[in-house]
Image (cartoon, rainbow, N blue to C red):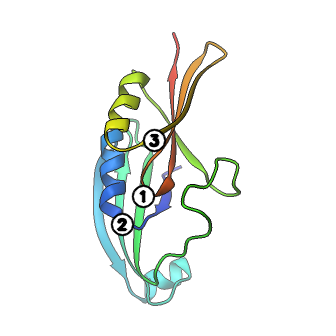
Amino acid sequence: MDNVLVVVDDLEAMKAFFLELGLTLEGEATVEGPAVGALIGLPEVKATLVTLRTPDGQGVELDKFHTPVAVRSGPESAPVNALGLRRIMFEVDEIDAVVSRMLKHGADLIGQMNYDDTYQLAYLRGPEGIIVALAEQLK
């Protein structure tokens, strides 16, 4: 897998959220025109894309559509059992420190638990309702 796409309204807030989480900025560009529109099935498209990478190379792409305007398909704070892509999970070291840092950055803690003495898990809700899960392998 190269990346996961997240369509956003507030590109700067979402970019700051993922940078705070520890991803690095790979690039930022605005794309538009007939070739892009034909590729994604949206005529007269114009979008700004931000690509970010985890330390192990996994990608997250944030897209802000200028034209046509993005369509919200459900409530901003959809529960984790709503149909569709609901969360992105990252493996982290020092999960408590990461959770603390993200809470200071405006994330909301949904919940935390230890799973079978194997992983410590935390679910956070970030900007625009995105759910990010964190997992630290217990040693």
Q: Nearer the viewer, mark 3 or mark 2?
A: 3
Residue shown at the point (41%, 68%) measured from the top left: 9
Q: Secondary structure at mark 1?
A: strand
Determine whether label 2 and label 1 are within 8 Å by CB. Answer: yes
Q: Which residue is mark 3?
A: 108
Separation of marks 3 and 2 at Cα, in angstroms: 25 Å
Of labels 2 and 1, earlier in sequence is 2
Task: Kindly identify the amino acid type of the residue bearing the numbered disc 1.
Answer: Glu
Q: Which residue is mark 2?
A: 49
Task: Kindly identify the amino acid type of the residue bearing the numbered disc 2.
Answer: Leu
Residue shown at the point (37%, 55%) measured from the top left: 14
Q: Is residue 20 above or below residue 70?
A: above
Image side of residue 137 versus residue 16, left or right: right
| Nearer to the camera, 64 or 126 | 126
Image side of residue 19 versus residue 90, left or right: left
Q: Is residue 119 above or below residue 33?
A: above
| Nearer to the camera, 74 or 60 | 74
Q: Secondary structure at mark 3?
A: strand
Separation of marks 3 and 1 at Cα, in angstroms: 22 Å
How many residues crowd mark 2 within 10 Å: few (<14), some (14–19), many (20+)? many
Residue shown at the point (56%, 71%) measured from the top left: 72
